């Protein structure tokens, strides 16, 4: 799986740039509600969009990205702004207690050892540093309503969470959760209908034909059944 991430084709990801920009702005607002600018690490930084926004808001930024193509884009976008590492957090040799904030948006569900991953993040945080994450929520109404058709049931998601399991993982990793919440993701109407059709949601195939026109490019905020958490390194 790690090799697949390194060689992934970012075409679909890049096609949703407008929606991802809006989602990244929501992430930045979550961070801004909890602490002033400092030094930030974004794990799984993709093309560097979120870090570029954070830099504009006063943060000193650094990122890690396993996809070679997305890393290359991020390195170009953040040239002169921040440093980007190609690889995984587990492979990195970043110094301990060096970041005021670490963000792992839509990442924890992809790692085989979430507790070990969070513990590594905890070791990189300064005293009272904050960690921010977003993951699929098994207790969400979307997951319960859609069941096996829930769009977040993906082969690359090796872990799923709810508030209780996140609490346990955080405690074992030396983190104290301060807040749980939900935020929508923004995607084009065409992409949303494409994903729904993949899961055989009734009516999505007809909508997909309509979305191939101008309507398909409209960006829509949608709740997928996720949960975000804000944590702090325990002193």
Image (tube, grey):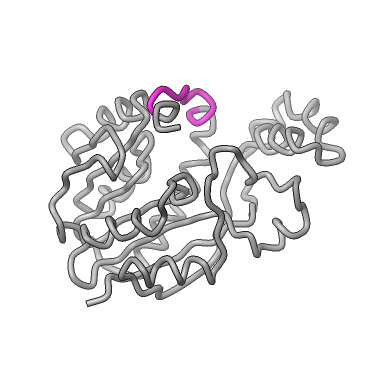
Check the picture and name the quadrant holding the C terminus: bottom left
* Image spot of residue 95 (x, y percent): 13, 52
Locate residue 40: give its quadrant.
Answer: bottom left
Locate residue 66: give its quadrant.
Answer: top left
Q: Nearer the viewer, residue 13 or 8?
A: 8
Q: Is residue 10 magenta?
A: yes
Count how many numbered circles sit on residues in the image: 0
Magenta extent: 6-14
Q: Is residue 127 left or right of residue 161?
A: left
> What residue appears at the point 33 percent right and 25 percent down from the top-left corner?
68
> What residue appears at the point 55 percent right and 60 percent down from the top-left corner?
161
Q: Is residue 115 left or right of residue 144?
A: left
* Image spot of residue 39 (x, y percent): 19, 56
> Does residue 66 lie above or below 130 as drawn?
above
Check the picture and name the quadrant holding the N terminus: top left
> What residue appears at the point 47 percent right and 44 percent down from the top-left corner?
110
Q: What secondary structure do most residues of the magenta stretch adopt? A: helix
Locate residue 79: give its quadrant.
Answer: top left
> What residue appears at the point 28 percent right and 54 percent down from the top-left corner?
57
Q: Is residue 167 magenta?
A: no
Q: Is residue 106 left or right of residue 37?
A: right
Q: Nearer the viewer, residue 219 or 172?
A: 172
* Image spot of residue 94 (x, y percent): 16, 47
């Amino acid at each position: 799986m790690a090799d697949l991430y390194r060689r992934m084709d970012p075409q679909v990801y890049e096609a949703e740039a407008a929606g991802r920009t809006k989602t990244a702005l929501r992430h930045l607002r979550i961070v801004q509600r909890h602490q002033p600018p400092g030094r930030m690490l974004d794990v799984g930084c993709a093309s560097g969009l979120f870090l570029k926004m954070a830099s504009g808001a006063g943060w000193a930024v650094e990122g890690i990205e396993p996809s070679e193509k997305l890393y290359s884009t991020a390195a170009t976008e953040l040239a002169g702004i921040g440093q980007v590492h190609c690889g995984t957090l587990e492979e990195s040799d970043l110094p301990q207690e060096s970041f005021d904030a670490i963000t792992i948006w839509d990442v924890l569900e992809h790692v085989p050892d979430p507790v070990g991953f969070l513990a590594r993040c905890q070791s990189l945080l300064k005293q009272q540093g904050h960690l921010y994450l977003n993951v699929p929520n098994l207790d969400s109404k979307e997951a319960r309503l859609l069941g096996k058709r829930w769009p977040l049931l993906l082969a690359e998601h090796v872990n799923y969470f709810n508030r209780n399991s996140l609490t346990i993982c955080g405690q074992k990793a030396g983190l104290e959760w301060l807040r749980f919440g939900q935020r929508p993701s923004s995607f084009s109407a065409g992409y949303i209908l494409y994903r729904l059709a993949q899961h055989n949601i009734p009516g999505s195939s007809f909508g997909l034909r309509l979305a191939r026109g101008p309507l398909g490019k409209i960006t829509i905020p949608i709740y997928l059944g996720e949960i975000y958490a804000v944590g702090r390194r325990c002193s």
